[in-house]
Amino acid sequence: LCCGTTSGACTSIPTLITRSRHAHGSSTITVVRAQGRSYNPEPKVLFSGKSEFNGNVQVIEIPDSAILDSAVEELRGFRVLLLDDCENIHSLWRKEAFITNSCWDYLATLAHLSPPGCIGILGLGAGTVANLGSQHYSGIKMQGWEIDPVVVEASRLCFGVGSLEKEGSLVVHVGDALLRSSTIEGGFSSIMVDLYADGVLLQQLLQVEAWQSIRHRLKGGIGGRVMANLGVSPRSIDGWPVDEDSVNTIKALSCMLDVFDKEVNVLHIRNMDGPRTMNVVALTGPFEGLQEAWVEGLPYALRILAVDSQGRSDNPEPKVLLSGKSEFNGNVQVIEIPDSAILDSTVEELRGFRVLLLDDCENIHSLWRKEAFITNSCWDYLATLAHLSPPGCIGILGLGAGTVANLGSQHYSGIKMQGWGIDPVVVEASRLCFGVGSLEKEGSLVVHVGDALLRSSTIEGGFSSIMVDLYADGVLLQQLLQVEAWQSIRHRLKGGIGGRVMANLGVSPRSIDGWPVDEDSVNTIKALSCMLDVFDKEVNVLHIRNMDGPRTMDVVALTGPFEGLQEAWVEGLPYALRILAADCRWERWESSK
């Protein structure tokens, strides 16, 4: 096999529905019927071709609503390149900005360590690293080599490479990446190397001559570097045996030391295949000041990489942004979780978020971050009331620090909301720390300090729809267990337009896998009973997974007709919220349940 084959895979492809065998360490996309959800949609084949270098070449798109093994759930919405029957993923891409949680993210960071000029990519694959470079480094210039013309065709059709070429950030060459002629006049400012065949580091990279050829293509006198994905780390993890494939990694590192004057630095990074293996990314050039320069230059979306590599600094502590006393909630605190925080796996998605803590119940009462976000909780579902609502202003009874209002503004252009919060200290926190002040300035949100359950907490003519999220001390507000509260809420809907009420009612009365039903679900049932009485028996529910763990679910209730609800809800979901449709399905609530 000639040099310059498609870039090496750093993780195993989840075995597709049509396959029956597994590669070691791979995960399976299962076909399941979960709680009320529809059957798992199958991956879609976007491209299929034959190659003299890689045999079958396929591009698969994983649906946003696919139900995946937890190890690969972040592949939802991605397109993946499959080659050479080794069941590895050779390239990843999605339409929206992305990171891959693999060595490609690290390779892209060569851009801010490189002197000005054009960066060479030896082993372009279908352009994952080129896409990451273009996304995170404005004005970057790259030229990439890929030996397989079928892969290049797939990259242009399915992986956004055609767009990179048109915008001038990438020039693509079909040819052998290890030929000395695979270069540009004057040389590259720096070079990325990602060369594999059949899922194994290219054998030529175990020889000094290959690295001499690569060094020869750097522009002289400017301090250019070479960054290479060398595959399996020779480092043992928690006493587990070192992977035998690491022999090749050591040989390649030895060659690099010989060629680059002993100036070779490494990152040992966690492998997507599981906790027992690591990969190595090598970088040539001086070590002094490298860690500081690398971390300081990381783009915002890639700062998490500074946590995941060995040699990490001590875990930074959460920062208290605001602390106050409230007659309603006692201590009010806003905590910011650093992007580089090392968190338990159950809450690792809180990195970079600000959280509102109240009333000593240890619950998170609001979430926010500067960039667009979803919360993986009931707030995401409440925000979707926007596309089920007739035109008009939506009321939010129980604004908290504005999580739902922020989600509504992010995902629904032109939305108008008015929200009530009883605690002036929380409202102050929302404006200072949770972006609510910006929502007020742009006109998407009006904030009221007051009792959300008063009939006077309304607007002239009534709301088009209403969200209800009212708790005290972490428990559903007791007034919501009485018919009068729901009568008051219904009274505030604008008449004759089909407005709905959506409410977060807390713990579901549904048992999961035989576990006992949470005793707090008694309150949920009482609230649902009151809603049935007030809303003419038209109450529908979603049973959604709870952030607290796999044994509990929450309930979101929605008033109004059931017929056509699921279809209208799924069809109107914004792109970033489509994942919600995978986790649940609307059901009509009946008093016998």
Image (tube, rainbow, N blue to C red):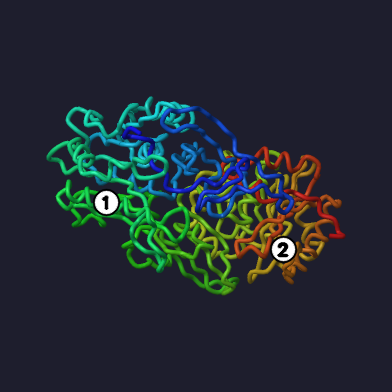
Whichever of callouts 2 and 1 sits on the residue coming sooner in the sequence is 1
Reply above or below: 472 against 215: below
Is residue 215 found left or right of 199 in the rendered image?
left
Q: Quadrant of the C terminus?
A: bottom right
In this figure, which residue is indicated by the disc labeled 1?
Answer: 251
Label 1 SS? helix
Q: Is residue 449 left or right of residue 464?
A: left
The vertical placement of 361 against 468, above or below, is below
Q: Amino acid at mark 2?
A: Asp
Q: Decide if residue 463 is on the left or right side of residue 375.
A: right
Q: Label 2: which residue?
A: 513
Q: Position of residue 452 (x, y in %)?
A: 67, 60
- Comparing 184 with 558, the one in front is 184
Mark 2 burial class by Cα count in 10 Å: few <14, some 14-19, many 20+: few
Amino acid found under the numbered disc labelled 1: Lys
Q: Which mark is residue 329?
A: none
Label 2's element?
Answer: loop
Front-lying residue, 416 or 28: 28
